[in-house]
Image (cartoon, grey):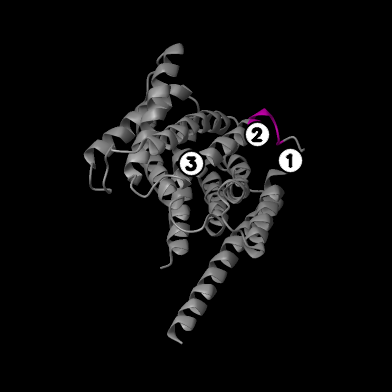
Amino acid sequence: MSPNLIGALFMVGSMAAFTLNDTMTKTTGGAVPLFQLLFLRGLISISLIMLLWGRLGPMHLRLSRRDWKLVGIRSGSEVAASFFFVTALFNMPLANLSAILQSLPLTVTLGAALFYREPVGWKRFSAILVGFMGVMLIVKPGTDGFNVWSVYALIAVMFVTIRDLSTRRLSKAVPSMTVTFAAVLSVTVFSAFAQLATPWAPVSAPHWQAIAAAAVFVLMGYYFSVQTMRTGDVSFIAPFRYTGLIWALILGWFVFGDWPLPSTLIGAAIVAATGLFTLYRERKLSRRVVMVAKR
């Protein structure tokens, strides 16, 4: 497979893992305080990394000063994004929150074009815009559904954009597991201090299970998201972030009983069609390249 197709698969996997993490986190229903939950989830994720050390790929801390700076920017952005995202998660429907996050393909693609001079063809950019229109059918900004928690989600979008763009600039010598570990450790340490301001709440067995499952999924999501931004063209991979909305709609319906409105289903169909069109065009271009090479 081409680097673009591999990157697209990483993106789909990342979106599925993050959405499953969000679902497990939301099932706690706020019974566990926010920072306590993030702290416990982080401890489990770090334990998993220690157990799987070396099995998920190389991992070392011998980085250049430039790469350490980028890892620091990325980790700080991850902490801020986690705070704003999880706060919004407890206060709005999963599908609505995920829909707002689907503005990321636009922000990341535009950022890569503006700051890194990465080429963005009109067809790819058109696919991103069409997908974004589908998202707007779901979000419906300006209605009662757009509130302060939606603003929290938009702030999370800004920090995730910074996170992804800084990942893009990391040198190939930096192992993806090192970046993943730095992100998990940063969020865990921040949460450890932040949770001291609130009383420690008892955690029931079902909530422990939900937090443990969330830890597994968020670790997968972190790793896949790092791999995504280091493989292929951002403008090609970006539309596949929209698949997270499909996962959110399905899980929101099955787990929380949030039945989508007709406009939401139409928007989801547009989002899915955007990804399929992008994939179809890439496969067509790949075959054309192979045919030219054979000649």
- In front here: 154 or 261? 154
Circles 2 and 1, Cβ within 8 Å, touching? The answer is yes
Image: 131 above or below 82:
below
Image: 282 above or below 29:
below
Q: Which residue is under mark 2?
A: 150
Whichever of callouts 1 and 3 sits on the residue coming sooner in the sequence is 1
Where is residue 180 drawn, in percent x and y? 37, 40
The CA span between labels 3 and 2 is 25 Å
| Dot in front, 3 or 2 | 3
State whether residue 32 appears in this view. no
The CA span between labels 2 and 1 is 9 Å
> Splitting the image into 4 quarters, where does residue 39 fall?
top left
Query: Which residue is found at the position 38% from the left and 27% from the top?
Result: 188
In the displayed structure image, the side of residue 117 where residue 295 appears, left or right: left
Helix, strand or loop status at disc 2: helix
**Disc on res. 196:** none
Where is residue 116 drawn, in percent x and y? 55, 49
Q: Residues within 10 Å of mark 3 (few under 14, many from 20)?
A: many
Query: Which residue is found at the position 48% from the left and 83% from the top?
Result: 291
Q: Residues within 10 Å of mark 1 (few under 14, many from 20)?
A: few
Whichever of callouts 3 and 2 sits on the residue coming sooner in the sequence is 2
Amino acid type for the residue under numbered disc 3: Ser
**Disc on res. 141:** 1
> Which span of residues is magenta-colored?
145-151
The answer to if 12 sits in the magenta stretch is no
Where is residue 80 drawn, in percent x and y? 51, 29
Q: For the view shown, which residue lies furthest in the front direction? A: 65
**Disc on res. 166:** 3
> Splitting the image into 4 quarters, where does residue 95 fall?
top right
